[in-house]
Image: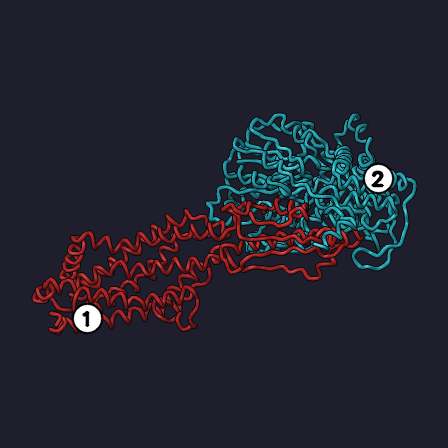
Amino acid sequence: MLHGMYSQLCARVTPALWRHKPAVIAVLLGAGLAIPSAQADTQTAVATSNDQQACYVDGLSEQMQCGSISVPENYAKPNGKQIQIHYVVMPSTKPNNKSEALLAIAGGPGQSAIENAKGFDRMLSKVRQTEDVILIDQRGTGQSNPLQCIGDGFESALAVNESDFDTRVETQKCLDELDADVTQYGSLSALKDFEAVRQHLGYQKLHLYGVSYGTRMAQLYMRHYPQSLATVTLDGVVPMQQSVLAIGNAIARAFDLLVEDCANNTLCHTQFPDLKSDLEKVDAELAMAPKISQVPDPLTGELTQLTLTRSKFKGSLRMALYSPSTRSLIPHAIHQAANGNFQPITGLYAMGIDNAGIAMGMHASVVCGEDWQRITPELRAKTNESYFGQEMLKTFAESCAVWNMPAVDASFSQPIASDIPTLLLSGELDPATPPSWGELAMEKLSNAKHFVAPYATHGVAYQSCGNDLIAELVEQGSVAELDAECLSEDIRRNFYLNASTVEAIPTDADEQTALNK
Amino acid sequence: MSNKIITMIRKELIDAARDKRSVMAGLYYAIGTPLLMCGMFFLLIGQLTSPEDLNIKIDNANGAPDLVKFLASRGISNGDSNAEDTKNIQLIISDDYAANMAKGLSAEVILVADASNEKLQNSIRRLERSLQEYSGEMGSLRLIARGIDPRVMQPIKVNVKDEATPDSKAGMILGLATMTMIYAVFISGMNLAIDTSAGERERNSLALLLSHPVSTWEIVIAKITAVSIFAMVGLVLTLLISKLAYSFVPWQELGFAVSVNANFIVMMLIVGLPVAIMAACLQLFVSFMAKSFKEAQSYITIVLMVPMMLAMAASYNIAPDTIQWLPISGQLQALIEFIKGRELPLTQLAVSSTFTLAIALGLAIGMQKSLKSEKIVFGL
């Protein structure tokens, strides 16, 4: 049970590699189009041969079918180096004729779909009653020739001061260690793998569910293999026209919404009347110099040095914005930090350490090839307005120079024109892909509906009735009947008012009355 | 087979077919049972699964608005206590809930329900699960707020690897279904067995038949064959109707699949044939022993309890291992293993089938002998 809860809390994934130098900045500032993920610390499905075999994935007791196919690392050289693309088929409960299945595509870029099987299974449980669900570890992630950047590691991630890093040097070190042609790990090669897996498994049509960066893969699928698709769901949409590096403004927007939410909530406002100034105060102080203190390590309990930098502070809060449950702790964490107590911030920061999730090498291949190169001067200026935007531009400028990815064609950034039934889901509170991005993706979709869930963050289907809508879409094969009403159901929870409660804190007088009753 | 026997089998079948009502009566079971079973499962699934919107009674809901909201997001709400769809489950939020919560202590909620009520069990479990989920989530966040990694709260991570397949999860239901199918061979031939033995004697046509230049063996074989054919027709019908009907039941709501596929049908027919022959012999033998048609009916009903018991023992796994060597229970267990996708216990299947045929042979010899006795032929 606890694990379930915990995975929900672990919702943002990116920080996996905080221990490793090259990753540190990339992670705190990475594109972060990840979804709420289960904790992924295991040997998941072990599929060694090309043959499909019964297997288990982390966190699910049920038998799945695992397998892999061999594909050329470089499709232009079909006889060159081959890599294995691993997949898992989660069989439907009801026996079906195997003509259709749902392919769920993970985010990141760099998350493993198979490591997130538990989350997908839970969210897609209704779909799984009738359809098989396929998870593919996209090339460069999970078990499919992962491009991990394993740096030297640190005694303590808490003690690190991020501004001491030389991104260029660390990225170069990572690149030297990888045994792969990193230029082949962009979305378009991966798309060919996906289609190859579909053919290998013999499904005639696929329903797609893409979340976060996975929506880019889904849109590319719509562009290149429309005949293979029955329906598409894009959850937390990254439109083709948008560079993910524009995320900086989305983060700033989500921070503003949080402050606003607290101000509109009587309990929160009474408890934290100066939230905005608290946040600005801590931010300004840390921008001057990091605060160094001794704290018990969140995991080991041993005293350790905490170098609280601006990057750690804002990065932790940003990550907390991804999931509604950790988001509810943010006002308390900010208020405590303003009063000199960094425990809640440390706790939030620690959620990221050690929580594997994003293959940073693959992340760099995608972002450098597809997003970095198309930044226009206007976008650069706009992105530079926000703290995260600035830092991200700086980091990727250095790492992409090393990674040296060829830029994708200009046509890559064209909007998708399609009449495949498509459902787009956006969360109003999303700190990564705001609803306006969903609107952008709608531009040339002629058979699509875009729903905005007013109380959801990133990954709408995980937090609302969005998953029911997907099941409906898959069943009916059309968006005509879909109704957004259930998304507006008020599922907002209270903010934490102290370190223990979300309910109104009774005054002494209240308590006396309660006792007398 | 000699022409005489074939002629006699034809005679038996024509005789049987002439009385359409009784033919149908025999086959009603084969057609009706799968349908009834499906109807029952439909109801059962409705009863067992927790409704999408679960309404319960929540006392002092104002004492914990966030908890109530969380439960609502899990589809559990405070229903009108007089409304019919409000389940008889009560959640009482204690008066000091908020105070204890604020201090970092455990806040108390009381769950009142009758756990022996099967219809409520799933709903109760769902409520408990939701409460635990809420508690776990808050516990984790409380730790985070204190700078502690919530993973320290989970010293052991249990990863279960369940070897069940969707088919084997349905074992209980398939066991029941297979049992009714095997039973179809007993019921479908029963009317004909009685009619062709005790019935013929009552109509005095048995003596007439015996006065013809045919041996008693030929008569016995013809009768057994005719009854077996009826039994097998019943089995085929049951299988076909099951295949159709079972696919309409929303099994997936129970988390498994029940399907009657072609492999299973073939397997069932092969395994069912010796059982059908034995059933025919048994019923004929008992009917010949009885003095009248009515008596035969009563005896057969009693005798049929034995295969019924064996079948039940096999499908519910309640008897010692020896039953896997016995007729009927042995075959049934082999069939259940087959559906569950496990290895077919060939030895057991061979032994129990041999047993079945041996019993059939014994009964046939008995019948052949008895037809030579005036006592039996004239029902004296």
Q: How is the structure coloured here?
A: by chain
Question: How crowded is the residue under tag 1: few (<14 C-alpha within 10 Å), some, or many (20+)?
Answer: many
Report the residue marked by disc 2: A279
> Which chain is in red here?
B
Tell me what residue is drawn at x 77 percent, y 34 percent.
A256
In this rendering, the count of numbered labels is: 2
**Left or right: where B104 falls relative to B273:** right
Give the residue type at disc 1: Met
Q: Nearer the viewer, mark 2 or mark 1?
A: 2
**Chain where mark 1 sits:** B
Tell me what residue is drawn at x 20 percent, y 73 percent.
B366
**Disc 2 element:** helix
**Chain where mark 2 sits:** A
Q: Is residue A479 visible?
A: yes
Point out residue A448 in the picture as x, y percentages from the top left corner.
58, 30
Report the residue marked by disc 1: B289
Tell me what residue is drawn at x 40 percent, y 53 percent.
B40
**Left or right: where B104 falls relative to A94:** right
Mark 2–mark 1 CB contact (< 8 Å): no
Point out residue B68 in the picture as x, y percentages from the top left corner.
64, 46
Give the residue type at disc 2: Leu
The foreground one among B278 and B344 is: B278
Point out residue B120 in the picture as x, y percentages from the top left corner.
52, 54
Q: Residue A76 carries which label?
A: none
Location of residue B125 by image quarter? bottom right
**Left or right: where A457 falls relative to B300:** right
> Which chain is in cyan here?
A
